[in-house]
Amino acid sequence: MKCPYCNNDMVLGVIRGGRDSVKWISKEKDKGFILSSFAKGITILEWLDSKVEGYYCKECNKITIDLEKQL
Ligand SMILES: [Zn+2]
């Protein structure tokens, strides 16, 4: 995959879940760490045995992630 920013080749890899889920929450809905589990957002990783694939660009230091379809 070509990087959408610089058009260099990106490297495919995986991001694995840890002990907590990982979510993207819009800036306006972000009310801090304690309330983050209640905030509506886009789930990137469920906890434990989950992973997502992403492409890394070492030029731009960015990762693009293929998300699961959101419910
Ligand atoms: Zn790039």
Image (spheres, helix red, strand yellow):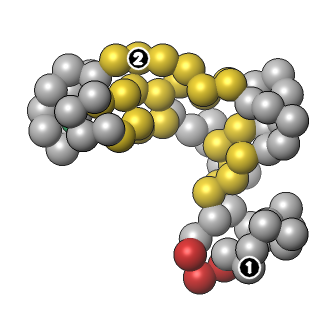
Q: For residue 12, which numbered disc appears in the image?
A: 2
- Quarter holding the N terminus is top left
Picture coordinates of residue 45 (x, y %)? 71, 38
> In front: 10, or 32?
32
Picture coordinates of residue 13 (x, y %)? 48, 17
> In front: 59, or 21?
59
Amino acid beneath label 2: Leu
Residue that protrudes farthest toward the top in the picture = 12
Picture coordinates of residue 22 (x, y %)? 72, 46
- Image marks 2 and 1: residues in contact by CB distance under 8 Å: no
Q: Ligand 1 is in which quadrant of the figure?
A: top left
Q: Going by the image, does 47 lie left or right of 13?
A: right
Q: For residue 67, which numbered disc appears in the image?
A: none
- Measured along the vertical axis of the image, is residue 51 above or below residue 69? above
Amino acid beneath label 1: Lys
Based on the displayed image, in which of its 4 quarters is residue 14 positioned? top right
Q: Residue at x 65, y 43 (%)?
A: 44
Mark 2 Cβ inside 8 Å of ligand 1 = no
Q: Going by the image, does 3 lie left or right of 65?
A: left
Label 2 packing within 10 angstroms: few (<14), some (14-19), many (20+)? some
Label 1 packing within 10 angstroms: few (<14), some (14-19), many (20+)? few
Q: Going by the image, does 2 lie left or right of 15?
A: left
Residue that badge 1 annotates: 31
Picture coordinates of residue 71 (x, y %)? 72, 51
Q: Going by the image, does 65 lie left or right of 46?
A: left
Q: Residue at x 79, y 67 (%)?
A: 33
**Secondary structure found at label 2:** strand
Q: Which one is closest to the eye, mark 2 or mark 1? A: 1
